[in-house]
Amino acid sequence: MVAIHITSDQPGTAARLAWTGAGFAIPLARLSVSRLRVTIQEVLSQDSYKNSASSLQEAIQRAGGVRRAADIVELAISQEKPVLATG
């Protein structure tokens, strides 16, 4: 994945994506057609990005998948407070 972060939570999300190794972040101020082209080609051609994304996918599945994530979000909203990890 290539993230182009512009505003709000996007810089943080893009930084976490890059930190996991599953993608690359380009700040809008440094974006150009040529840089985007090169970055996309790099992400698509280097196995490290795919391997990192696969590792994240497996971790998400082990943690209960998107259904569990949605349940946590709904619980946090209904309780109006964070949901702490258990077990």
Image (cartoon, rainbow, N blue to C red):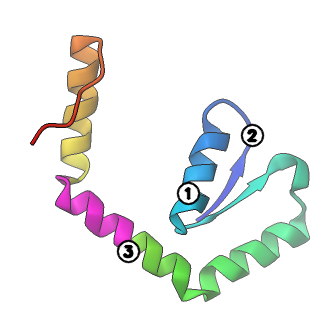
Q: Amino acid at mark 3?
A: Ser
Residue at coordinates 71% horizontally, 81% vertically from top-left? 41
Label 2: state its secondary structure. loop
Return the x and y of residue 11 as percentages of the image width and height. 67, 42
- Residue extending furthest toward the top: 80
Residue at coordinates 86% horizontally, 57% vertically from top-left? 31
Mark with earlier residue (1, 2) = 2
- Write down the residue under mark 2: 6
Magenta part, dominant SS = helix
Position of 56 relative to 31 (above/below): below
Q: Is residue 56 magenta?
A: yes
Whether pointer 2 and pointer 3 mark residues with C-beta atoms closer than 8 Å, the reply is no
Q: Amino acid at mark 2?
A: Ile
Residue at coordinates 70% horizontally, 74% vertically from top-left? 40
Mark with earlier residue (1, 3) = 1
- Residue extending furthest toward the left: 87
Position of 62 relative to 46 (above/below): above
The part of the chain drawn in magenta is: 54-64
Mark with earlier residue (2, 3) = 2
